[in-house]
Amino acid sequence: MEKTLLNKEWAAIDIGTTKICVLIAKLNEKGDIEILGIGHNPSHGLKKGVVVDINSTVESIKSAVASAEKMAGTKINNAIVGISGGHVQSFNSQGVVAIRHGEVGQEDIDRVIESAKTIHIPKDREILHILPQYFKVDGQQFIKDSSGMSGVRLESQVHIITGSVSSASNIIKCCEDAGIIVSDIVLETLASAEAVLSKEERELGVGVVDIGGGTSDFAIYKDGRILHSKVLPVAGNLFTRDLAIGLKISLDRAEDIKRKYGFVSSKQPFTSSQDFSNIDLGYGNDGQALDPYALYEVLQPRAQEAFEFIVDDVIDFNLRPFMPFGLVLTGGGSLLGGIKELASEVFGMPTRLGRPQNNLNSQGESFVPDVLKSPVYSTGYGLLIYASRGKDLTLAQSSSGPLVSRVCKRMKSWLYDFF
C-alpha cells in the first residue's frame, strides 16, 4: 500500500437511482480505511442507473458531497465513481498469439489480451473493463499467471464489460458540474463484490447479487476471478411502484411501507405482534387497515421474477457448478424482509446477506466501521477499497482528449486490479 496515501483524504461517490452516497476516507497508520464523512441525498434525475435529468442529478450530487464534507471538515476535489445501469453489457472473449522469445513476457500477455478484445463493438459503446480469467500455454489450461512460462502459443480468456459512451459521459459531466473531478469509474458490481466477498468465496466459487433501486447487478467469481456478470432491469423501484399501484397509495408512502413492513417469503412472514390496523396508508385511504398479506401478494411475485431472471442465466450458461458457496445478496434491496429465504428457495443453494467486511491492514486484521456495516454501503465501501490501493487519484491535466475517453482508457488498463 502506498505510504503517500496515509492520512490523505479521498472520496467515493455511489450514484444510484434512488440515492447518492458520498464517503470521504483516509488510511491511518495501521493501514485501516478510516471514514471521515458520510453524505446521503435522494437521487433525482436518474432512471435505471442512467442520467435523464442532468440538472437534478447535479444538485443531488452537490447536496450529498456537502453533507460528507461538513462531517469530514474538509473539501474534496476529486472522487472515484461507481457506474451501473441497463446499458452495461458483458461477455467473454478469447485471444491467441505466438510467444516471441520462447518464454512468456509482459509484452506477450499484453498482446494476447489485445487480441481478445479485437471484436466488433458498436460505436456508441465503450469498453469499461477487461478482466482476464485465465491463460493457456501450448494447450495447458487454466493458468492464472503465465509470466515466465516456456512455450510457443499463448491463449487468453477475458471478461469484457462494455457500457454506453453517452451514459458514462453524462455521469462524468454531472460530477464535473458539481465541482468534482472523476478520477476513475468502477462498475458497481465489481465494487460491491470487493466489499462483501471473502477470499475463500472468490476462490472456490460464489454468486453475488447487488439489488439497487434501478437495477440489480449479478456476478459470479471463481478461482479469484470474475467468471460472469449481468445487469438486470428489476430492482427496488419496481417493488415500490407495484406496491403503490396495488394498495392505491403514493410512491413515497409505498416506499416507507415496503421498508418497514414488506416481506417476500412465507418462511419469514410479518410478526404477529405487529398492529397493522393503525397504519396510515395516506390520502384517500382513511380508516383502511393495512392487510399484511397484501404486501406479500404484491412484492413476492416481483422478487421471484428478479431471481428467476438470474436462474435463467445460470442455466443458459451452465454456471451452477461454479457456485459451491451459494449466493450473496447485497445492496439496499437485500434488506427486504424474507428476500434471503426466497433466494435460497428459488436457487436451491445457501444464501447470505453481504455487508462490507474486507478491510485488511498490514497486520491481517479486518476492521470496518460499524456505521458502514450495512448492505446499503457495499458499493461505496468497495470503491474506497479500490481507491486505497495506492493509485494516483487525479487524472493528469496534460492528458489529451475527452475526459470520458481518458477515464475509460485507464479503466481498460487495470487488468489485474480486482484480483
Image (spheres, rainbow, N blue to C red):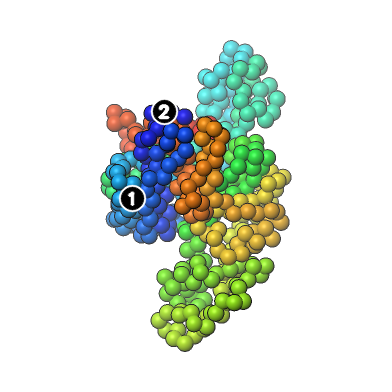
Residue 7 place in picture, x, y as percent: 37, 35
Residue type at the position of mark 2: Lys
- The C terminus, quarter of image: top right
On residue 3, which mark appears? 2
Residue type at the position of mark 1: Met
Residue 79 place in picture, x, y as percent: 36, 41
Number of numbered discs: 2
Q: Could you give the CA–CA distance between mark 1 and mark 2, rounded to whole angstroms?
A: 25 Å
- Residue 220, above or below 46: above
Q: How many residues crowd mark 2 within 10 Å: few (<14), some (14–19), many (20+)? A: few
Q: Tell me which residue sits at (63%, 71%) in the image.
A: 269
Badges 1 and 2: C-beta atoms under 8 Å apart?
A: no
Q: Tell me which residue sits at (64%, 42%) in the image.
A: 201
On residue 411, which mark appears? none
Q: Is residue 241 visible?
A: no
Query: Is disc 2 placed on a helix, strand or loop?
Result: helix
Residue 324 or residue 197, whichever sits in front: 197
Residue 361 or residue 63, whichever sits in front: 361
Query: Is disc 1 placed on a helix, strand or loop?
Result: helix
Q: Quadrant of residue 181?
A: top left
- Residue 263, above or below 1: below
Residue 238 place in picture, x, y as percent: 50, 65
Q: Which residue is under mark 1? A: 71
**First reached walking from the N terminus: tag 1 or tag 2:** 2
Q: Tell me which residue sits at (36%, 35%) in the image.
A: 8
Q: Which residue is most to the bottom?
A: 287
Residue 265 place in picture, x, y as percent: 64, 67
